[in-house]
Image (spheres, coloured by chain):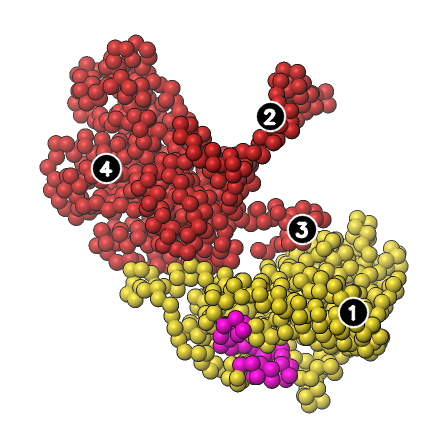
């Protein structure tokens, strides 16, 4: 690992904007959050993966992976980050290093040629070049090659130095943020800056979620100047420094980027969420208020309130028909990078019982809200190990699990319906429309008749009677430090 | 053509060459004297309207695109499942050519069947001579162990009496007294191939059981019924019984004769139920039919000879396979083994894995009565909603039975049952009340093209796709195959709908 990368990793892990980190002893801070990997224990993605998924939604850029085939070969086009235009980001580019390249040190030369080939055949606005374990280990100078190629071809060639071995996927998200700050943001000036320009950071337009929110902002005249990086264009990212306000959606991934935008260009930021009705309203309110503070016309506030009132009413009306189908269902929430209290509130409003929710990535303020909504804190847990979750579900403590893809099979083996609310999902649940969609999918998951077949013993067994199981509420489950569900 | 010299073109592209297009266009303009394009289009649109649908459904005296075949086809199929059996269809030979090609195109195997090749004089004077001559020739040319005689319309119309004809023919044709010549009257103007199947099964049992005294002993028989997937399904049935350590006599096993290996040897006869097995079947406690509507008369005959009978409607899907497995276990006097519990678990696991893609999908289903029953039942198990169930050869009683099945699930309440309706009626149904998927056979491809509803080929005949019949649809394993076929269609359609470059491809996802 180069000295430069070492220093960057150290800086990124010691995130001053992170409350958890600030609470630690000085010597502990640079260790970062939950990134110590246990050999033999199940683990999430690597730093390369994290960097790639944070940047890949920049859809008009070429993303070139410098390494053996495995890294890109196993991962290309595996995220549902949607594009409204260019499809280049889904095309897989890799130098496909072979044994001879490694032994003979041909990596740099091959990379230079690869960049040339990408530029000549696709002429993208920029090329992101990712290092991998192998290219980093053999010591290829990614930055030097990128610089030479940029000069030669006259377009940005950006080194993303986040080889897998430096740490977790989350660390890779952050290194990608650093890369944008160092190489991209601030390199293009917008032609028509407006007092209603905002950045949305940490929203990757998975399944088109950004598009569920964008129309709301459009109606208020709020423009997403910098999107990092949902459905983003390269130049859009490069202009992010001229926005008035940054909304940070997935705090865990890119806090450093929001902080960097503030430190370097004085753009204030706030953490918000588009999941759930109340959170969506709160996010719109905050955006409007902060923009007005920064000089936007004051009528924005009234227009925002009018929009919120109209949308909330419409959403509740759309949710009403689902009530009889989901009422009384017990939900266990185990989510990744987004906050859950406003989803909890909406589910409860529809008569569902939330028997437990993870608070791993919630702030203290969020936890207080959850306590307020759910009565006490006995239903909150930090992490839940698969075997505990299985036990809880097996005991029929919940009718449906809402979680990321990796808990899916825990749920299914426990014969429990499951709704994907994480990155690999196919449906968009953001904003007001997304809440209706989410409830529709809970309905669909819970009420599918095949659960009778899944749950009941084979009919020649004793006890065959597909009666609805009833059980007491969620038992106290010991938390396990193993965090198997990544953001 | 000049630029393509030396390159032989397939018809799929040849007629798209400019000279052919010009030729066809010239023909259309100068000779066909057709209606104006606008008018053709307007009428085509009108045929998809509610107005047309009402006329179409009220249609009584015309069947358009029937989803059924005639009795002798079923008889030929049933007879093929007996060892060394040659089907002899008494009547005109053209009919028999159809059965052969029909079965051959589906199973991709040679299908042997002969006819008495009746002509006009036979029609006037009776078919006895043709039958006598035909039986002698069949024996001489093809050396079968059994000649199973069924009839075409022609012989039925003139009223040939098979029983007396065959007795006379035995002597006149000099047939070996041990040669079995069972027969069944199978008029095509009555019923359909499933009735022909039933009649021939009964005829064969009658023949072999006639002079036997029943001496009841443990064991049971299985009548599989007419089934385009019989090759794999019967093997799957045997495998299931093997897992359970039991055995049964399968009355008509076509799995070998309609799936012979390519090893240089032509097998006109392969496998099948042996003569001893058929005779022994009389003494079994029970005869189990896997397709009720294919075996009403056969089971009645079994009951008349003192047997218990059971019947189910095509063991496809979870609950239907459960019934099959438990019935087999009960009849065999064994417990269901762990291996089948695991298979079942894997099937429901697969259903669970894919449920979000299946839930709420709507279906139009057509085919034979038992198949449609099972298919609708399985679809509902996956959270799908049958909307149209059509069986051209289904009667009102079938309609009632379907109604009861559909009313038993919230997923069936919006389904309409159409006994006796044909595929042209189904076209109107699909045009006015479209569904997400259409389940049927190869004939459905035109419905698919006309109405845009994707077709899943799951029942006989499947002519335009190969080898589906080599994979079972029965049992838990079979249900898994069916599930995959449906899912593939859903995903293929999804990819097609989202795959237009630069337009709809935001959701053209690698992972579904």
For disc 2, the marked residue is B11
Badge 3 and badge 2 both on one subunit? yes
Residue B48: image x %, image y %?
54, 36
Q: Nearer the viewer, residue B172 or A471?
A: A471
Q: Could you tell which of marks 3 and 2 lies nearer the N-terminus?
A: 2
Q: Are marks 3 and 2 in contact (CB under 8 Å)?
A: no
Residue B26, above or below A78: above
Of marks 1 and 3, the one in the foreground? 1
What color was chain A assigned in the picture?
Answer: yellow
Specify few, some or many for label 2: CA neighbours under 10 Å numbering under 14, 14-19, or 20 or more: few
For disc 4, the marked residue is B298
State the residue at coordinates (69%, 55%).
A90
Q: Are marks 4 and 1 in contact (CB under 8 Å)?
A: no
For disc 1, the marked residue is A198
User: Which chain letter matches label 2?
Assistant: B
Horizontal side of B78 relative to B440 (left or right) equals left
Q: Could you tell which of marks 4 and 3 lies nearer the N-terminus?
A: 4
Q: Which residues are magenta?
A: A347-374
Residue A306: image x %, image y %?
71, 70
Letter of the chain shown red in the rendering: B
Q: CA distance from mark 1 to mark 3?
A: 27 Å
For disc 3, the marked residue is B505
Q: Quadrant of residue A349?
A: bottom right
């Amino acid at each position: 690992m180069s000295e430069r990368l070492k220093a960057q990793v150290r800086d990124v892990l010691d995130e001053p904007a992170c409350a958890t980190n600030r609470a630690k002893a000085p010597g502990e801070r640079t260790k970062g959050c939950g990134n110590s990997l246990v050999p033999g224990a199940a683990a999430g993605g690597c730093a390369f993966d994290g960097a790639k998924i944070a940047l890949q939604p920049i859809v008009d850029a070429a993303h070139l992976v410098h390494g053996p085939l495995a890294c890109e070969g196993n991962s290309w086009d595996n995220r549902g980050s949607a594009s409204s235009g260019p499809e280049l980001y889904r095309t897989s580019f890799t130098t496909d290093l072979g044994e001879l390249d490694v032994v003979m040190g041909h990596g740099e030369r091959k990379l230079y040629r690869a960049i040339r080939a990408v530029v000549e055949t696709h002429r993208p606005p920029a090329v992101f070049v990712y290092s991998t374990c192998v290219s980093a280990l053999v010591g290829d100078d990614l930055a030097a090659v990128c610089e030479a190629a940029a000069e030669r071809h006259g377009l940005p060639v950006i080194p993303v130095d986040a080889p897998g071995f430096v740490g977790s996927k989350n660390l890779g998200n952050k290194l990608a943020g650093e890369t944008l700050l160092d190489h991209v943001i601030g390199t293009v000036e917008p032609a028509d800056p407006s007092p209603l320009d905002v950045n949305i950071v940490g929203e990757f337009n998975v399944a088109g979620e950004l598009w569920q929110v964008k129309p709301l902002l459009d109606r208020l005249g709020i423009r997403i100047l910098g999107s990092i990086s949902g459905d983003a264009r390269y130049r859009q990212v490069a202009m992010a420094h001229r926005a008035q306000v940054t909304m940070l959606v997935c705090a865990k991934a890119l806090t450093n980027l929001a902080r960097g935008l503030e430190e370097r260009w004085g753009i204030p930021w706030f953490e918000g969420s588009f999941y759930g009705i109340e959170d969506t309203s709160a996010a719109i309110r905050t955006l409007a208020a902060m923009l007005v503070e920064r000089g936007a016309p004051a009528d924005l506030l009234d227009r925002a309130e009018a929009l919120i009132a109209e949308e909330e009413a419409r959403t509740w009306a759309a949710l009403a028909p689902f009530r009889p189908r989901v009422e009384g269902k017990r939900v266990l929430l185990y989510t990744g990078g987004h906050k859950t209290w406003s989803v909890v509130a909406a589910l409860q409003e529809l008569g569902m019982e939330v028997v437990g929710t993870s608070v791993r990535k919630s702030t203290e303020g969020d936890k207080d809200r959850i306590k307020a909504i759910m009565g006490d804190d006995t239903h909150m847990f930090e992490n839940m190990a698969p075997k505990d979750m299985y036990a809880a579900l097996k005991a029929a403590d919940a009718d449906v699990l809402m979680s990321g893809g990796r808990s899916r099979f825990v749920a299914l083996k426990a014969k429990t319906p499951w709704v994907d609310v994480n990155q690999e999902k196919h449906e968009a649940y953001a904003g007001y429309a997304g809440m209706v969609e989410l409830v529709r999918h809970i309905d669909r998951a819970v009420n599918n008749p095949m659960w009778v077949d899944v749950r009941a013993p084979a009919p020649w067994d004793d006890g065959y009677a597909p009666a609805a199981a009833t059980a007491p509420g969620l038992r106290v489950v010991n938390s396990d430090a193993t965090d198997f569900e990544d953001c | 053509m000049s630029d393509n010299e030396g390159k032989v073109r397939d018809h799929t592209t040849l007629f798209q060459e400019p000279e052919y297009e010009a030729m066809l266009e010239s023909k259309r303009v100068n000779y066909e004297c057709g209606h104006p394009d606008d008018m053709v289009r307007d009428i085509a649109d009108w045929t998809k309207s509610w107005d047309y649908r009402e006329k179409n459904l009220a249609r009584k005296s015309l069947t358009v695109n029937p989803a059924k075949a005639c009795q002798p086809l079923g008889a030929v199929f049933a007879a093929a499942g007996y060892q060394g059996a040659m089907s002899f269809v008494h009547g005109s030979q053209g009919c028999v050519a159809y059965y052969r090609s029909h079965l051959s195109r589906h199973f991709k195997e040679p299908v042997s069947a002969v006819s008495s090749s009746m002509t006009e004089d036979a029609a006037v004077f009776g078919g006895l001579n043709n039958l006598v001559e035909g039986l002698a020739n069949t024996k001489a040319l093809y050396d079968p162990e059994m000649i199973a005689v069924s009839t075409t319309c022609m012989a039925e119309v003139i009223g040939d009496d098979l029983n007396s004809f065959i007795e006379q023919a035995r002597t006149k044709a000099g047939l070996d007294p041990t040669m079995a010549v069972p027969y069944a009257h199978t008029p095509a103007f009555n019923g359909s191939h499933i009735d022909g199947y039933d009649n021939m099964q009964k005829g064969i049992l009658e023949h072999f059981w006639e002079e036997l005294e029943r001496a009841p002993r443990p064991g049971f028989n299985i009548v599989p019924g007419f089934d385009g997937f019989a090759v794999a399904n019967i093997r799957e049935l045997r495998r299931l019984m093997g897992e359970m350590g039991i055995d049964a006599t399968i009355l008509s096993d076509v799995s070998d004769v309609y799936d012979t290996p390519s090893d240089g040897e032509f097998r006109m006869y392969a496998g099948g139920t042996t003569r001893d097995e058929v005779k022994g079947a009389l003494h079994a406690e029970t005869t189990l039919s896997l397709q009720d509507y294919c075996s009403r008369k056969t089971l009645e005959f079994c009951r008349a000879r003192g047997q218990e009978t059971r019947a189910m409607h095509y063991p496809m899907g979870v609950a239907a396979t459960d019934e099959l497995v438990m019935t087999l276990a009960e009849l065999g006097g064994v417990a269901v083994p762990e291996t089948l519990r695991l298979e079942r678990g894997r099937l429901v696991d697969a259903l669970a894995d894919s449920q979000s893609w299946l839930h709420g999908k709507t279906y139009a289903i057509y085919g034979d009565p038992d198949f449609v029953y099972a298919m609708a039942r399985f679809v509902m198990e996956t959270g799908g909603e049958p909307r149209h169930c059509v069986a051209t050869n289904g009667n009102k009683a079938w309609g009632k039975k379907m109604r009861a099945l559909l009313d038993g699930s919230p997923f069936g309440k919006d389904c309409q049952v159409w006994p006796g309706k044909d595929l042209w009626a189904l076209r109107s149904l699909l045009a006015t009340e479209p569904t997400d998927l259409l389940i049927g056979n190869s004939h459905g491809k035109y419905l698919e093209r006309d109405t845009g509803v994707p077709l899943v080929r799951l029942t006989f005949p499947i002519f335009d796709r190969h080898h589906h019949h080599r994979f079972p649809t029965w049992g838990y394993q079979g249900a898994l195959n069916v599930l995959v076929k449906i899912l593939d269609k859903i995903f293929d359609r999804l990819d097609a709908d989202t795959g237009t470059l630069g337009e709809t491809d935001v959701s053209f996802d690698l992972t579904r």
